Amino acid sequence: MIGLLARLLGTAAVVALVLATPLAYGRLVADSKIDSELQQQLGDGSYAYSVQVDLDFPPEYFHIRKLQAIGTVAGIQGNSVRVLQLTPDEVHEIAQLYWVKRLEPFAGPKP
């Protein structure tokens, strides 16, 4: 009986560790994903920011939906997603997503 309980607790601990690892990783590296220019802009007191979220792969439905839940997705180009109307906290929330490679300021379409 004790052996079964120990195995169940061990399995639960491994599952908890596996589920927590992406969150912990995201928090540890979030600041390094934010472009230095965007870092400076985040301290200027503005309410809304527009960012380009770069991924290592073409975004899929899951990624777009997650970003849309945080801000306003304004378009996709290659491996990048433009997200508008973000607060500084929301920018940091996106940076914590383990599948995000980099965040840069997005000024609008280039002529």
Image (spheres, grey):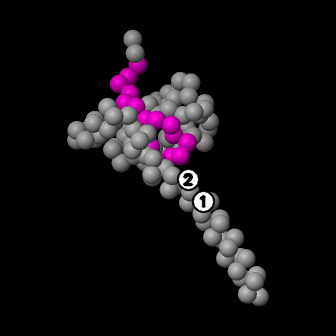
* Above or below, comparing residue 40 to residue 20 in the picture: above
| Residue 88 shows in this picture | yes
Task: Give the class, few, some or many, for how many residues have Cα within 10 Å of label 2's Cα (few <14, many ≥20).
Answer: some
Q: Give the numbered dot on residue 76.
A: none
Magenta: main secondary structure equals loop
The percent coordinates of residue 24 (x first, y second) are 50, 56
Q: Residue at x 60, y 32 (%)?
A: 57
On the rendered image, what quadrant is the C terminus found in?
top left
- Residue 107 among magenta residues: yes
> What is the quadrant of residue 42 in the picture?
top left
Residue type at mark 1? Leu
* Above or below, comparing residue 25 to residue 7 in the picture: above
Q: Are marks 1 and 2 in contact (CB under 8 Å)?
A: yes
Over which residues does the magenta segment extend?
95-109
Seen from this angle, which residue lies furthest top? 111
Q: Which residue is mark 1?
A: 19
Query: Label 1 to label 2, Cα distance in Å?
Result: 7 Å
Q: Secondary structure at mark 2?
A: helix
* Above or below, comparing residue 90 to residue 49 in the picture: below
Q: Secondary structure at mark 1?
A: helix
> What is the quadrant of residue 105 in the picture?
top left
Q: Which residue is mark 2?
A: 22
Seen from this angle, which residue lies furthest left? 45
